Amino acid sequence: MTHNELLKLARKKAGMSQTEFAGYFRMPVKTLRHWEINERKVPDYLLRLMLYKLEMEGYVSGLQEMVDTED
């Protein structure tokens, strides 16, 4: 699973729309859209931090390990 797919999966598991997710992380919606449609790659360190925050706040679980297994 690519970083972009993993980010989209995390957003959906958290039950957030793109607008809500972008607002939660205080980022432009356009940036999130570019990442989700694979126009740009999510930086590895940023994806790890985002997944960590989502896991610590109880929105998702078990996704952080998937960053290391990207094909």
Image: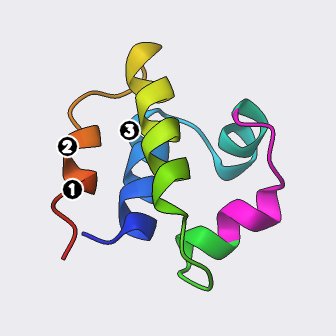
Category of crowding for the residue at label 2, using alpha-carbon neighbours closer than 10 angstroms: few (below 14), some (14–19), many (at least 20): few
User: Label 3 vs label 1: CA separation?
Assistant: 19 Å
- Looking at the rendering, which quadrant does residue 70 occupy? bottom left
Relative image position of residue 29 (x, y in whole percent): 79, 57
Residue 38 seen: yes
Q: Inspect the image, locate mark 2, and give the three-letter code of the amino acid beneath it.
A: Glu
3 vs 1, front mark: 1
Q: Are marks 3 and 1 in contact (CB under 8 Å)?
A: no
Residue found at x 84% / y 54%? 28
**Is 13 drawn above or below residue 37 in the view shown?**
above
Where is mark 1, residue-wise?
A: 68
Which one is earlier in the sequence, the residue at label 3 or at label 1?
3
Query: What residue did someone put label 3 on?
Result: 13
Q: Which mark is residue 41?
A: none
Badge 1 amino acid: Asp
The residue to which callout 2 is attached is 65
For the magenta stretch, what is the residue range? 25-33
Check the picture and name the quadrant holding the N terminus: bottom left
